[in-house]
Image (tube, rainbow, N blue to C red):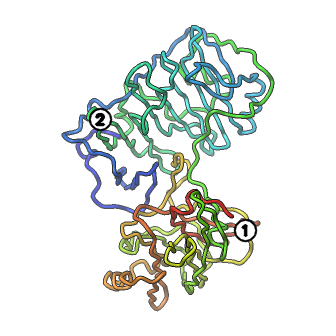
């Protein structure tokens, strides 16, 4: 997120690690990130010195009233479902949700939302209209410490503008970290005064707001949230019922979760689309793939090279069955590829997990995000890591030109299986694991629109 001349230049070469951010494809590169989205670009030279950041409140030593609750109601300007401090402590210990409203002079100035089951805590600053306008989100890492994840803020047009008005925040600063939690860069997305969207990056010392939020702190105790909000005055706790709320007005952010993957890779499974159409899954056997190194690469076939990064989850070297699954709406001509599976074992799959590559960590993902590969040809391929450079570009292009459900190229030791999808962008790979935790299969999820909201029938 930083305005150095070099840092603000958009990278020109895509690398292999990508994240899908709320519909915009962001390609993480060695030097930062590159956005490939349909946002409006700045019409002139972007004003990097005057980003639309929100006000950062000054610390205060005034008395603070603490209300533990389910969340905040900006319209009523009141906590939702207050709870006793003992309930909040129990929720905290169990990883459950709770919130803390912090009032100064009887006026709410901050709200904290916590859910350790999702490694999440977010400090919200509240304006005079009772609206949350600046959120400072943290992730709890395996060492138990909180690391700054991102800051989002909204510049409201007027006092009557609804909370979180618009398609997204006016300003977002995402902290990029490596697996050791060291900060690499800060990715910035900002809405300019002309309505265009600027995407750039900075390094940590050049944080764009007036004051840097703490980026690495010990996880506060349940009564320690006022200090994180810069409120150091004497605190009193409002009494409340000793019951756990049944509903919460917010949900913690979660990376993309697998959606009916087991059914998507089941021959004959039926779904009912949101518009009432009946959808059916068809399995197309696609032969086998040899994995002499046990390291599977999933990529756009036009981007294979020596730097192609395999999935971190490996399998014993060998030959494995491959199947393509299509979803049809009553007639074959409507078929779209929904998934491709590499079967490692026929043991029942009991859980699904996002596939990562070395250097990926799920704490780097926001709500609905995932790691995947950039796709420029609406096509994915599977190949052993040792075969990533075994096939000539002309060979690949010739095979891709036909309209088959899948296409195969083979060398003396490896196979390249090419599966057309339906769109450019990025796609997740799911790991199916058996009851004992062993890897049972890889599933390439094509995120087919027909299945996005469909339910098993």
Alpha-carbon neighbours of circle 2 within 10 Å: few (<14), some, or many (≥20)? many
Q: Is residue 343 above or below residue 208?
A: below
Alpha-carbon neighbours of circle 1 within 10 Å: few (<14), some, or many (≥20)? some
Between residues 83 and 182, which one lies in front from this camera angle?
Answer: 83
Residue 434, numbered circle? 1
Q: Is residue 359 above or below residue 295?
A: above
Residue 141, numbered circle? none
Q: CA distance from mark 2 to mark 1?
A: 49 Å
Instruction: Judge from the rendering whether residue 234 lies leftward or rightward of residue 193; answer left or right.
Output: right
Residue at the extreme right? 242
The answer to whether residue 327 is visible is no
The residue located at (46%, 91%) in the rendering is: 412
Residue 234 x %, y %? 63, 10
Which element carries disc 2, helix, strand or loop? loop
Q: Is residue 377 above or below residue 7?
A: below
Residue at the extreme bottom? 412
Instruction: Judge from the rendering whether residue 370 lies leftward or rightward of residue 211; answer left or right.
Output: right
In the rendered image, the quadrant that contains the C terminus is: bottom right
Residue 27 x %, y %? 39, 56
Instruction: Judge from the rendering whether residue 361 lies leftward or rightward of residue 172; answer left or right.
Output: right
In the rendered image, the quadrant that contains the N terminus is: top left
Among the two numbered marks 2 and 1 on one chain, the one whose residue lies closer to the N terminus: 2
Find residue 101 and report its image quarter: top right
The residue located at (53%, 50%) in the rendering is: 368
Which element carries disc 1, helix, strand or loop? loop
The answer to whether residue 417 is visible is yes
The residue located at (19%, 39%) in the rendering is: 45
The residue located at (39%, 44%) in the rendering is: 185
Q: Is residue 409 above or below residue 216?
A: below
Instruction: Judge from the rendering whether residue 166 lies leftward or rightward of residue 86; answer left or right.
Output: left
Between residues 127 and 233, which one lies in front from this camera angle?
Answer: 127
In the picture of the structure, the residue carrying the numbered disc 2 is: 192
């Amino acid at each position: 997120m930083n305005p150095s001349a070099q840092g603000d230049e958009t990278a020109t070469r895509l690398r292999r690690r990508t994240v899908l951010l709320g519909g915009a494809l962001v390609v993480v590169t060695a030097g930062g990130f590159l956005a490939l989205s349909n946002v409006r670009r700045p019409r002139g030279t972007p004003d990097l010195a005057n980003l639309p950041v929100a006000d950062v409140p000054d610390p205060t030593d005034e008395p603070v009233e603490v209300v533990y609750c389910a969340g905040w109601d900006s319209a009523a300007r009141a906590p939702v479902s207050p709870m006793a401090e003992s309930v909040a402590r129990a929720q905290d210990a169990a990883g459950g949700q709770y919130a803390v409203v912090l009032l100064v002079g009887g006026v709410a100035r901050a709200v904290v939302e916590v859910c350790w089951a999702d490694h999440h805590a977010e400090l919200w600053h509240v304006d005079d209209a009772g609206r949350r306008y600046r959120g400072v989100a943290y992730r709890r890492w395996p060492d138990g410490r909180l690391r700054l994840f991102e800051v989002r803020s909204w510049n409201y047009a007027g006092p009557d503008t609804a909370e979180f008005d618009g398609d997204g925040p006016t300003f977002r600063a995402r902290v990029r970290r490596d697996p050791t939690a060291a900060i690499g860069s800060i990715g910035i997305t900002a809405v300019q005064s002309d309505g265009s969207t600027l995407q750039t990056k900075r390094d940590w010392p050049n944080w764009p707001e007036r004051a840097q939020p703490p980026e690495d702190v010990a996880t506060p105790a349940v009564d320690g949230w006022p200090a994180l909000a810069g409120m150091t005055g004497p605190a009193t706790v409002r009494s409340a019922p000793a019951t756990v709320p049944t509903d919460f007005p917010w949900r913690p952010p979660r990376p993309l979760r697998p959606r009916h993957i087991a059914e998507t890779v089941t021959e004959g499974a039926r779904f009912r689309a949101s518009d009432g159409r009946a959808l059916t899954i068809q399995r197309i056997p696609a032969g086998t793939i040899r994995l002499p190194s046990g390291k599977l690469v999933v990529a756009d076939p036009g981007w294979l090279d020596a730097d192609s990064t395999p999935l971190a989850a490996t399998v014993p070297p060998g030959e494995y069955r491959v199947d393509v699954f299509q979803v049809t709406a009553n007639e074959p001509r409507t078929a779209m590829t929904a998934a491709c599976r590499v079967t490692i074992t026929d043991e029942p799959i009991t859980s699904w997990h996002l596939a990562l590559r070395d250097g990926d960590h799920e704490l780097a993902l926001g709500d609905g995000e995932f790691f995947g590969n950039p796709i420029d040809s609406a096509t994915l391929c599977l190949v052993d890591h040792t075969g990533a450079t075994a096939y000539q570009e002309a060979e690949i292009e010739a095979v891709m030109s036909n309209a088959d459900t899948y296409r195969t190229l083979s060398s003396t030791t490896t196979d390249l299986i090419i599966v057309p999808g339906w769109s450019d962008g990025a796609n997740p790979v799911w790991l199916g694991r058996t009851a004992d935790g062993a890897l049972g299969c890889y599933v390439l999820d094509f995120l087919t629109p027909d299945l996005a909201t469909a339910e098993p029938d």
